[in-house]
Image: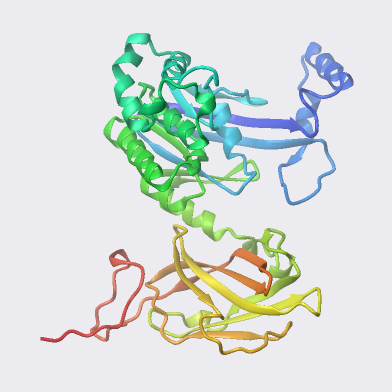
Amino acid sequence: MKTVIKAENIAKQYRLGLVGRGTVRDDMKRWWYNLRGKEDPFLKIGETNDRSSKGESDYVWSLRDINFEINQGDSVGIIGRNGAGKSTLLKILSQVTQPTTGKIYTRGRIASLLEVGTGFHPEMTGRENIYLNGAILGMRKHEITRKLDEIIAFSGVERYIDTPVKRYSSGMYVRLAFAVAAHLESEILIVDEVLAVGDAEFQKKCLGKMNDVSKGEGRTVLFVSHNMGAIQNLCNKGILLDKGKIADLGDIGHVTSLYLKSGVEKKGIKLKERKDRLGRGNARLVEVQILNNQNLEVGGEFILKIIFEVANPNLKINEVGFSIWDMKENRIISISSTFKSQIEEFLPEKEIICKIPVLPLLKGEYVLNAFVSSIFEVEDYVENIFTFTVNESDFYGTGKMVNPEWGMIVVEHNWEN
């Protein structure tokens, strides 16, 4: 296979709180080292880009030691937590910004969709911006004209195509920008998670087009998204970034599974100490545990323990609950204490037990989220508390195991004639 993108030792350093390189003193120091043929001294300092902790250095590495090769026709999903360096990497690949160290080698024209409205002139009409974007990508006028009707039809903004784009909504911006990027004859298509701006119907349409571009036309697609279902359906390879470094790359199924299982509980951080939480914060989950985790199986019993604490003793908690998600981030089950009024009063620091007598989940790995709410609103919500595995069993008593490819759940049923 022909290599179309190659990254060699890519790194990107930023200085916090300032625009540009920094102080005159720093610039003079760089100039003096460069004059003597020595390495930039500021490349030896800097910290990992960890948003959750306060650092001691003004310099952070958004990316560090990035090496990979992408072949023609590959669809590559770039995934990672917020702040992992995904958008920075795409900007370097799109030549929007230059790496601090290392080199990027590309073969072919690149079409990028990084941010809403990127490359559009607000005073120009949609039609004029199509030609402008095409020219930026290196397309000739007759090439753009040949694709014009197809671009307009796909975007769904034909009625407003001769209206200045400053009057477009963000959704219309994305529709037209994606249509231009996907239809012009570039060898490489780079798409950031801006598709989340569009409606569900258009997102589905975009994913279908990217699939056609990659598999049907043999072009290369790089796609950043937090939607693991979309990533797994579209991409054949994946790159997992963690704090600016490549944590894993290879088959998309393996990479996404590793990403979803790399919750903070894997790093030894207790639930009570987790900082990535949502809610008012007047109550806090301190322990969530599956009591029979060692022998979970299809159709077996599922017993979950939840313990929370409150900062204000007068706060009345009226609901606890949890949800179970698959490894593609599809919600499978949601359970709330309000579904059955079996607990009259929720007491802090006291165990709350939920039992599911017949677990309907098929064999596989799952993720659990949990929450606690007061009479006002959600007080604490934590995602990816842990992952757990459900083992197969002879659920129907026939000696035949249920294939996970047949669906998401098992249901007890009977046939008659």
Q: Residue at x 73, y 31 (%)?
A: 14
Q: Residue at x 52, y 27 (%)?
A: 167
Measured from the top left, where is residue 377 in percent x and y? 66, 68
Q: Residue at x 58, y 58 (%)?
A: 262
Q: Is residue 369 above or below residue 138?
A: below
For residue 146, side relative to residue 206 (left or right): left
Measured from the top left, where is residue 43 in percent x and y? 75, 29
On the image, which quarter does residue 358 sit in? bottom left
Screen quadrant of the C terminus: bottom left
Screen quadrant of the N terminus: top left
**Camera-nearest residue between 417 and 24:** 417
Q: Is residue 73 above or below residue 131?
A: below
Regarding residue 62, the answer to whether it shows in the image is: yes
Q: Is residue 275 above or below residue 222?
A: below
Measured from the top left, where is residue 272 in percent x and y? 72, 69
Measured from the top left, where is residue 113 in percent x and y? 49, 30
On the image, which quarter does residue 88 sit in? top right
State how the image is colored.
rainbow
Q: Is residue 81 above or below residue 173?
A: below
